[in-house]
Image: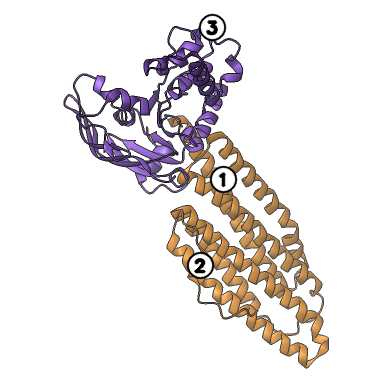
Amino acid sequence: MVNLTGRKEFDESLQKIEQDLLKLGSLAEDAISNSIWALQKQDDTLTLKVIEGDDILDELTQQINEQALMLIARFQPVALDLRTISSILHMATDLERIGDLGSGVAKVARRISHEPLIKPLIDIPRMGERIREMIDASLKAFMNRDCALAREVCAMDDEVDDLDRQIFRELLMLMMQNPRNIEQAMHLILISRNLERAGDHVTNLCEHIVYMTTGAFVKAGDFRRPQRGKEG
Amino acid sequence: MEKDKFSVRDLDLFYGSNHALKKINLQIPERAVTALIGPSGCGKSSFLRCLNRMNDFIPGCSVKGNVELDGSDIYDPGTDLIHLRRRVGMVFQRPNPFPMSIFDNVAYGPRLHGVRDRSSLRDIVEESLRVSALWTEVRDILHSPALALSGGQQQRLCIARAVAVQPEVLLMDEPTSALDPMATARIEELVRELRTRYTVVIVTHNMQQAARISDITDFFLSGEMIESGPTQQMFTSPKDKRTEDYITGRFG
């Protein structure tokens, strides 16, 4: 049995990992916001900062994984403790991937930073803003063990998917109008797709939060509007 | 897990005026390992002893309610206790071999139940020692004193002795708490194997042990059965807050 000292040490270590996860979350959030900002401002310094910053996310993820495994090995956690650690491991992976996607956006932004934009960017920044809000809310849901909020975040991904489709349609029109738009339009579609996938990772975060809190495995799709066929 | 071996209904147990078990309702499935967990004094060992009426030996102990073994109440006045304890064997916390040879320890029960034929006895002893995973270690020293064996071997000998009378159920009261980690691992492995033949009910203070070896876990607290469920579920998503707090080490 874990004696009182053991429990205290476990709680303290777990708290530290949770803090690291929140830090990872805010880094992932920054990667998305900054890459979009850099895209809008065609700012090469900022894109470079996002790309280089990805290493920090990777290291932090690695650190969280190591600490979590150490806790499992030393304390053999069960029940809520076990679910929390397992969820943290999964969530760290998802956040790290969101960071990768942000860095992916920055890489594409670099490629088009020296040419005039074919259209004013409205929906892509809006998507970025939604993702940022979703990450923010899911971290809150994690801290407060708030399942209801986690479910709401899943529903927010519908809007991200809508924006992705809208961006695709709009850019398709521009490509049809003028083949010289094709290259940049393709890049912008790639960015939109990266953001759409980041949204999916945020819904994964929410699935883990619900599992952690209740012990029930859920699918984010259960909290979203019904899918319309297999498009997009 | 096909059916219930034991079915316990509204079981109350008193030690004098002390109400040690309160309205216990519990099913114990056949050919599975059921672990009873809970803090000291929660009633799990008392409950275990109810299953073969070992509490009868304790002065001032009285029992109310039903404990059915294969559908018949073992607290019926007509119950043959010798027969009951043959069907429901017990292994205790500290290995307690008799001060006689290894062979005689295992043959003790069968002899008591009237087996006289030497070759049958030899077969029973060998089979029991094989079941308890001790045979290869003691086959050449069967006539040496049992007390010369190590603690872990002695405990496996006690399991062999319990198994020798061909019981249907094995009750184990913290069988590894006096053993080192290696001997504990051997016994745990053995318990996993025993479940294919016997219904095993084990009291343990070691929750990781319950998690490792049992199919069903029942959590007791202050004389009440708080929660019973598949071990996997109990250790990942217990339903009761008290179970959660106990197994995560928040009290106890």
At mark 2, the secondary structure is helix
Q: Residue at x 50, y 37 (%)?
A: B196
Q: Amino acid at mark 1?
A: Ile
Q: Are marks 1 and 3 in contact (CB under 8 Å)?
A: no
Inter-mark Cα distance, 2 to 1: 23 Å
Tell me, yes or no, whether dots 2 and 1 are on the same chain.
yes
Gap in Å between the C-alphas at discs 2 and 3? 71 Å
Is B147 located above or below residue B238 in the figure? above
Residues A145 and B158: in front is B158
Q: Which residue is mark 3?
A: B144
Neighbours of disc 3 within 10 Å: few (<14), some (14-19), many (20+): some
Whether residue B176 sits left or right of residue A205 in the image: it is: left
Q: Which mark is residue A17?
A: 1
Residue A177 appears left or right of B51: right
Q: Which mark, by number, is residue A153?
A: 2
In the figure, the orange chain has which letter? A
Q: Is A80 rendered above or below residue B82?
A: below
Instruction: Tell which subunit mark 3 falls on.
Output: B
Kindly report which numbered mark, 2 or 3, lies closer to the viewer in this rendering: 3
Give the chain letter at badge 1: A
How far apart are the alpha carbons under marks 1 and 3? 56 Å
